[in-house]
Amino acid sequence: MITTEQIQNVIGQTMHGSDGEKIGKIGQVFLDDQSGQPEWATTKTGMFGSNESFVPLAEARVSGDELTVPYDKDTIKNAPRIDPDQGHVSQAEEAELYRYYGLDYAESQSDSGLPTGEQYDQTGEVSNVGSDVSGPATDDAMTRSEEQIRVGTEKREAGRARLRKYIVTENVTQTVPVSREEVRVEREPITEANRDAAMAGSDLTEEEHEVTLHEERAVVDKEAVPVERVRMDKDTVTGQEQVSEEVRKEQIEAEGTEQRDR
């Protein structure tokens, strides 16, 4: 358990949970009435540190100015709400906290909190009793308080998108005109114009004439050419989201006298 000598080192420092996660800054330390040893510490939790949760120090460990407790952040965040400014933890509140954290609680044990005003604030100094404006050290008026919620937003990673390029194969069919040469036999009569050429040579001979034929055929050549550029951009879309949280408020009623509102 943390000792009174270590209070100065941990007040205002960060509390760490069982998994090493940062819980929040340590606000106040409450002492046991009988032993005078630190029994409870408060730490800021909730959105923007709007709540202050009580954490038992029975199994806490201190290393230098670092305080580690055997609870995770969600467990501490959801602990029963007790106003640390009231300056004292009542026996009923202490029993509720013990049950929540799974610790044994004896009814004979005294209230934890401030024996004659010993409460340590964030400066490590002892503060005075009567910090509650409706406490016994104030006048005969009673102040009614209530919890209010403060709603904000926080940015967190929701997913990732990436561009990936890969190759697919598809068939492309195109029609291209091709030409070829074919043999056509032409016959012409002997005329005065071609007689000399026709009568050249022997009267009767055997011979062959060869004609080379040509044709076109389709050929395919491929080249890679850029066709477009693709990029990713982000758009911000604004929607509505409802949040719901329980809040507590004090009610004041008069007993033993006729009540008349003014």
Image (cartoon, rainbow, N blue to C red):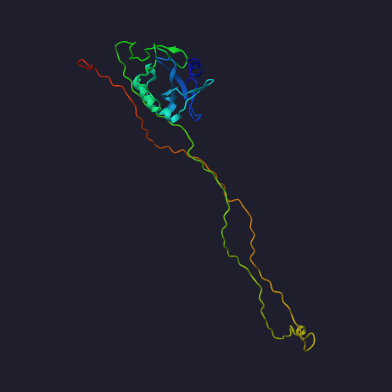
Residue 152 figure quarter: top left
Q: 229 left or right of 46?
A: right
Q: Nearer the viewer, residue 219 or 214?
A: 219
Q: Is residue 125 visible?
A: yes
Q: Nearer the viewer, residue 32 or 136?
A: 32
For the image shown, how many numbered marks are present on the structure? Answer: 0
> Does 257 appear above or below 190?
above
On the image, the x and y values in percent for residue 198 come to 75, 84
Q: Position of residue 228 (x, y in %)?
A: 57, 49
Q: Which residue is outermost to the bottom?
A: 203
Residue 46 visible from this viewpoint: no
| Quarter of image, res 175 | bottom right
Residue 49 is drawn in which quadrant?
Answer: top left
**Camera-nearest residue between 178 and 87:** 87
Residue nearest the observer in this picture, 13 or 211: 13
Does residue 99 lie above or below 225 as drawn? above
Q: Which quadrant of the rendered structure holds the C terminus? A: top left
- Give the residue at the far right of this rendering: 201
In the picture provided, is 40 more to the left or to the right than 262?
right
- Check the image and name the residue furthest to the left: 258
Q: Residue at x 80, y 87 (%)?
A: 202
- Above or below, 39 against 171 in this view is above
- Picture coordinates of residue 243 (x, y %)? 37, 33
Q: Position of residue 184 (x, y in %)?
A: 66, 79
